[in-house]
Amino acid sequence: MTNWQAKATRMVEVITASGELRTPLWQQVFRAVPRHHFVPVYYTPDDGGGWREHPSGEPGWLEAVYDDRTLITALVDEDGPCGVQQIPVSSSTAPALMAHMLEELEITPGMRVLEIGTGTGYHAAVLCAALGQDNVVSVELRPELVSAAGKRLAELGYHPVLRAADGRDGLAEHAPYDRIIATCAVPAIPAAWISQLAPGGVLLTDLKGGLAAGNLVKLSRNGGGALSGRFLPWWAGFMPMRHEQHIALVPVPHGEASTRRATTVPPFLLDEPVFAFLAQLHPPAGTSLRVRGEDNGSLSTVLVAPDGSWCQVAHEPGGHRRAPGCRGRSAAVVGSGGRHRAVGGAGATLLGAAESDRRTRRTTMGLGER
Ligand SMILES: C[S@@+](CC[C@H](N)C(=O)[O-])C[C@H]1O[C@@H](n2cnc3c(N)ncnc32)[C@H](O)[C@@H]1O
């Protein structure tokens, strides 16, 4: 047994002991497919707000690859409020989460599977090893990731259908699919996925809106055109699905707001998952929420709608949830950049509640799963 095989075997033992890997098929596949082949480099946050590269061969690289953790595998430069920043756009999902989702899907040999979010190609390789390459279709937004994944898969003898395209549209020419699994989060189930799911088929994705509230949801087509199902109790935090016209966070000008008001909404309200899930249905599709540091060291939350309208919530001292017995109170500023002023107002109310521990949430969202 080679060094990596010993590590993969150990990883399978750990995930099996945790209960996430149950069936011999997946245990065998996770032992056999070399994750390190798909993760020649990964990145971790450095102390200066940037990223540290961990290339193959670096001491500890192989151990990290066969540890049960999500690894950031691709960064891109993107304009942000503080200038150009490196943003993580792809990761290799933590193996236990992959296993959990695959087991949940009750995939059996002969099924056809559509994966949304090829990323490194590791998950596609796992599917190929279990089902055969002819039953695997994988769509990825970023062409450079598709070509790298395709090369790695081919080196192991796998040639699934790969396509550089927006996964929101599925891949109609190879439909129907018995299973659809998305490894990025969507704010709503795309209509194409529903129509491309075979009768009796099952779809599993992370369903989260602009406030990042939601979870894995498993939906089945049981007769007719509609899907039904439930959220799963196992929390996951996948990267949000992006689109070619990605909505970058626009810098919010200080002191140019048209409306100011205060909110007494308690800061912990959006920690209540059902409330947060329902609240995020109100802002327009594509609204994003970010946290930024202010010059005085405080944090403020910014909500940006696709048309450029925005609102900012500056959190006043004393409103932090960790202050014992405090009442949340945030100063809300609603911008006038577009058609969505009313939405901005609603966002401000919500953001006042959201202020509490967004820092933690942002880390989770930015770094992928778990
Ligand atoms: C968590 S990573 C995928 C992990 C991958 N399954 C693996 O094994 O490495 C999520 C991926 O979804 C991709 N993605 C984001 N938006 C997408 C879209 N609209 N269509 C297809 N893929 C998308 C990202 O580029 C990223 O590679």
Image: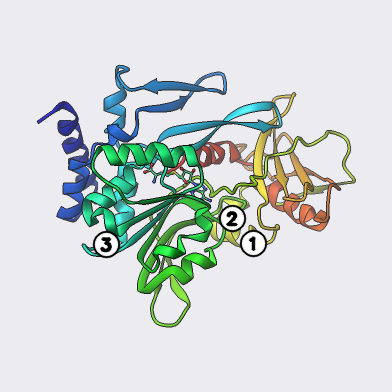
Q: Mark 2 and mark 3 in contact (Cβ < 8 Å)? A: no
In this rendering, position of residue 266 left or right of residue 159: right
Quadrant of the drawing holding the C terminus: top left
Q: What residue is disc 2 on? A: 209
Q: Earlier in the sequence, mark 3 or mark 2?
A: 3
Crowdedness of circle 3 by 10 Å Cα count: few (<14), some, many (20+)? many
Image point (74%, 24%), residue name: 296
List x then y, in percent, for residue 236. 43, 49
Q: Circle 3 — which element?
A: loop
The disc placed on residue 281 is: 1
x and y percentages locating residue 345 in the rendered image? 79, 54
Residue at 75 percent of width and 56 percent of height:
346
The type of residue carrying mark 2 is Gly
Local packing at callout 2 (Cα closer than 10 Å; few below 14, some 14-19, many 20+) is: many
Judge whether 363 appears above or below 56 on screen. Answer: below
Identity, as a three-letter code, of the amino acid under mark 1:
Leu
Between residue 133 and residue 263, name the one nearer to us.
133
Q: Residue 301, position in %: x, y? A: 69, 40
* Residue behind mark 3: 107
Q: Can residue 20 be spotted in the picture?
A: no
Front in this rendered view, residue 171 or 222: 171
Name the N-terminal-most of marks 2 and 1.
2
Quick one: SS at disc 1? loop
Measured in 3D between alpha carbons, the distance from the residue under mark 3 to the one under mark 2, in whole angstroms, is 28 Å
Which image quarter holds the N terminus?
Answer: top left
Depth check, front residue: 362 or 141: 141
Q: Nearer the viewer, mark 3 or mark 2?
A: 3
